[in-house]
Amino acid sequence: MKLIRFMKQALCLLLVLASFSLPAALATSGSYYVNTSSVYVRSGPSSNYSVKKKLHKGDVVTYSKAENGWWKVRYSGGSGWIYRKYLSKVKSSSSSVSSGRKYKTTGQMNLRSRASLTNSSVIGTVKKGATVTVKKTSHGWAYITYNGRSGWVAASYLKKL
């Protein structure tokens, strides 16, 4: 009886310990986008650390690791820490956005010269609710033509018609 009680306690302890590391384990490496108007990238996992860069809604980063609700991310030109709640998973462009299909935009977004947030210029804007055709995709980005201009937008803001 004592052995069974001990094993139950040990199992409970393991479950408690696993629950603390579960969010980090569920966060697989992949692309995430900023889901708020803007967010600061910090040099460490706390708001007490210095600001390295300011990212804006729709900017895409790559997950690296987690610590106390903060995620270390890579972005074009560097890396730093962002509080987790300001990031949302980018759906796989291969399954959710396909070349040659028409989509409706779910928000206003920037049309960019390259599939990059920090190493591309804004060449226009795409209005919320616009219908666009995707020409090609790359790592969470979609190449579209809109109002006579072609460029890249975050694929996470496109919904199938």
Image (spheres, rainbow, N blue to C red):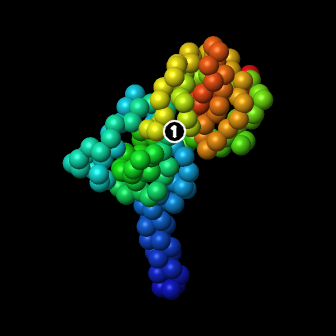
* Nearer the observer, 36 or 130: 130
Judged from the image, the secondary structure of the residue bearing numbered disc 1 is loop
- Can you identify the residue that label 1 sits on? 116
Query: At label 1, which amino acid type do we have?
Result: Ser
Q: In the picture provided, is 19 more to the left or to the right than 130?
A: left
Q: What residue lies at 45% left-to-right and 46% top-to-bottom?
A: 75
Count of marks overlaid on the render: 1
Pick out the residue farthest to the right.
Answer: 100
* Observer able to see residue 54: yes
To which quarter of the image does residue 28 belong? bottom right
Say which residue appears at 45% left-offset and 62% top-offset: 21
- Placement of the C terminus among the 4 image quadrants: top right
Q: Give whichever of 122, 159 is nearer the camera.
A: 122
Horizontal and vertical percent for residue 85?
A: 42, 41
Residue 12's place in the image compared with 123, above or below, is below
User: In the image, residue 63 lies at what x, y percent?
Assistant: 48, 52
Residue 122 lies, in percent from the top left, at: 48, 25
Q: Position of residue 112 (x, y in %)?
A: 53, 29
| Residue at 56%, 51% in the rendered image | 30
